[in-house]
Image: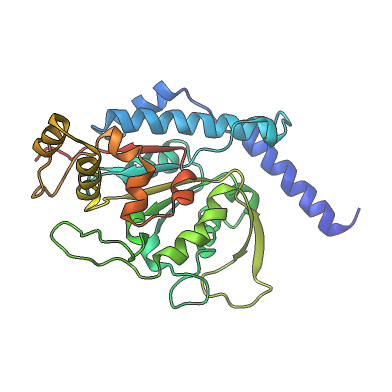
């Protein structure tokens, strides 16, 4: 056997051993562990993420340990967290995946990225950060978690959304970043730089995103105004009055309803490609914390 093939085989065997020994606590046990770790509130979001984490690990085990064809299993889960700043979105991801389950977890500020060829970091380096979190092990990184923080900031500037108390400050390159993320969030082979400097073409590794779970998180300021205007447009008669009475345009920290976040058209009006929103299997609203 050639030396490099032997190394790859040993690496694969080590990876499968790692997956086989990966703990898979029940969603209820994860929920309790989060409480013991000090996470309070957001019960609905916690339950949703604990179930997603359980399914993620179970799916990985079925593919790499039981040898089940990926095509025969449900597709991987990507979540979108929507809620006010400070409501615990990224903290929940870091606590569950990074501290409790100890899976490779990368928290990435998406606002520093731009479409390939423009000023700013290339979206492919999102996976570079995951690779670093996995101790430079591509196979281990390929089952990790990526949290895209400030996800709402890549909404296209081609809409009329206005941030609460801030005016329109959306990234004009947002649509390009969205297009770059489309195939990454689904399942694709990505050429990933080994470091963030793109030193040379040789310093890359090919990674599959077929088993990487992505979680977008953002405050989505101004989203409720857009959802409200669309609801007002679609309502007539007494229903129109009821919609108007339930909206506070001056509120800073707002709670999003299930109807608002489950309507892809609201995200499209906010400035997102409907295909990108469709890459998220569930949109989870977070409640504003009590003062």
Residue 264 lies in what quarter of the image?
top left
| In this rendering, position of residue 128 left or right of residue 14 | left
Which residue occupies 54% across, 30% down?
23
Which residue occupies 36% across, 55% down?
151
Q: How is the image coloured?
A: rainbow
Residue 49 lies in what quarter of the image?
top left
Residue 22 percent coordinates (x, y): 57, 33
Single out the residue that lies furthest toward the right: 1
| In this rendering, position of residue 28 left or right of residue 160 | right
Residue 169 percent coordinates (x, y): 25, 67
Can I make out residue 129 in this image?
no
| In this rendering, position of residue 16 left or right of residue 94 | right
The correct choice, above or below, for 84 with respect to 23 in the image is below
245 or 71: which is nearer to us? 245
Can I make out residue 68 in this image?
yes
Residue 249 percent coordinates (x, y): 10, 48
Q: Which image quarter holds the C terminus?
A: top left
Residue 220 percent coordinates (x, y): 27, 51
Which residue occupies 15% across, 46% down?
253
Residue 27 lies in what quarter of the image?
top left
């Amino acid at each position: 056997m050639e030396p490099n093939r032997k190394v790859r085989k040993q690496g694969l065997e080590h990876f499968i051993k790692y997956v086989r020994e990966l703990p898979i606590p029940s969603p209820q046990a994860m929920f309790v562990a989060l409480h013991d770790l000090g996470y309070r509130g957001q019960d609905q979001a916690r339950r949703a993420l604990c179930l997603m984490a359980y399914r993620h690990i179970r799916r990985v085990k079925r593919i790499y340990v039981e040898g089940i064809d990926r095509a025969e299993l449900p597709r991987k889960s990507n979540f979108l967290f929507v809620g006010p700043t400070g409501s615990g979105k990224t903290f929940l991801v870091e606590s569950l995946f990074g501290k409790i389950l100890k899976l490779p977890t990368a928290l990435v500020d998406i606002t520093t990225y731009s479409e390939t060829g423009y000023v700013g970091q290339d979206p492919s380096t999102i996976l570079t950060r995951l690779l670093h979190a996995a101790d430079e092990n591509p196979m281990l990184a390929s089952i990790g978690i990526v949290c895209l923080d400030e996800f709402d900031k890549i909404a296209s500037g081609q809409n009329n959304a206005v941030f609460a108390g801030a005016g329109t400050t959306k990234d004009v390159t947002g649509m390009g970043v969205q297009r770059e993320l489309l195939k990454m969030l689904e399942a694709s082979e990505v050429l990933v730089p080994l470091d963030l400097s793109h030193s040379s073409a040789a310093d890359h590794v090919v990674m599959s995103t077929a088993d990487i779970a992505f979680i977008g998180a953002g405050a989505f300021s101004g989203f409720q105004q857009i959802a409200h205007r669309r609801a007002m447009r679609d309502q007539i008669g007494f229903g129109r009055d009821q919609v108007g009475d339930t909206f506070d345009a001056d509120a800073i920290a707002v709670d999003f309803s299930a109807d608002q976040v489950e309507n892809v058209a609201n995200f499209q009006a906010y400035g997102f490609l409907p295909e990108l929103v469709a890459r998220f299997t569930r949109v989870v609203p977070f409640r504003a914390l009590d003062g």
